[in-house]
Amino acid sequence: MSDVSVTPTTVFRRQTRPERINIGDDELVRNDIIAKEYGATERTINRGDVKGAPFTYVGGVKYRPLKRYREFITSQIQTRGQPPARRQRSSHHHR
């Protein structure tokens, strides 16, 4: 058996991509770099995607717009003792 390890294509591709891409008034930051900066794993960071965390792919590599991602994180802050947000009831009445 060979003891040579094969690096997955995605890891190799990601490492050859820039960590940050300037896009005008914002900056795209590679997903693994965001995870490192927040002291979390990529898997944990990716859990926010279903809640609306902004991201995009550039050349098959996941990036997050830094300003918009920070706004998303801020919007997820919860305060104890606050009543849960209630859904609006529909305007039609049942008789």
Image (spheres, rainbow, N blue to C red):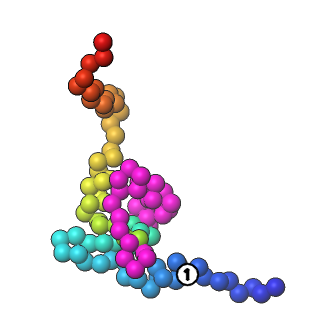
Q: Nearer the viewer, residue 4 or 52?
A: 52
- Give the quadrant of the N terminus: bottom right
State the extent of the magenta-drawn residues as a range.
Answer: 35-61
Q: Position of residue 81 (x, y in %)?
A: 34, 28
Q: Residues within 10 Å of mark 1 (few under 14, many from 20)?
A: few
- Name the residue furthest right: 1
Q: Quadrant of the C terminus?
A: top left
Q: Is residue 70 above or below residue 61?
A: above
Q: Amino acid at mark 1?
A: Thr
**At x 23% / y 25%, what residue is drawn?**
91
Residue at image point 35% right, 68% down? 56
Residue nearest the observer in this picture, 81 or 2: 2
Q: Is residue 46 magenta?
A: yes
* Relative side of 63 to 7, left or right: left
Residue tagged 1: 9
Q: Is residue 14 visible?
A: yes
- 5 relative to 77 in the view: left or right: right
Name the residue at the front extreme.
95
Instruction: Estimate the x, y position of residue 74 in percent, counting from the top left.
Output: 29, 50
In the rendered structure, the answer to whether residue 69 lies left or right of residue 91 reads right
Q: Is residue 91 above or below residue 79?
A: above
Does residue 13 show up magenta in the picture?
A: no
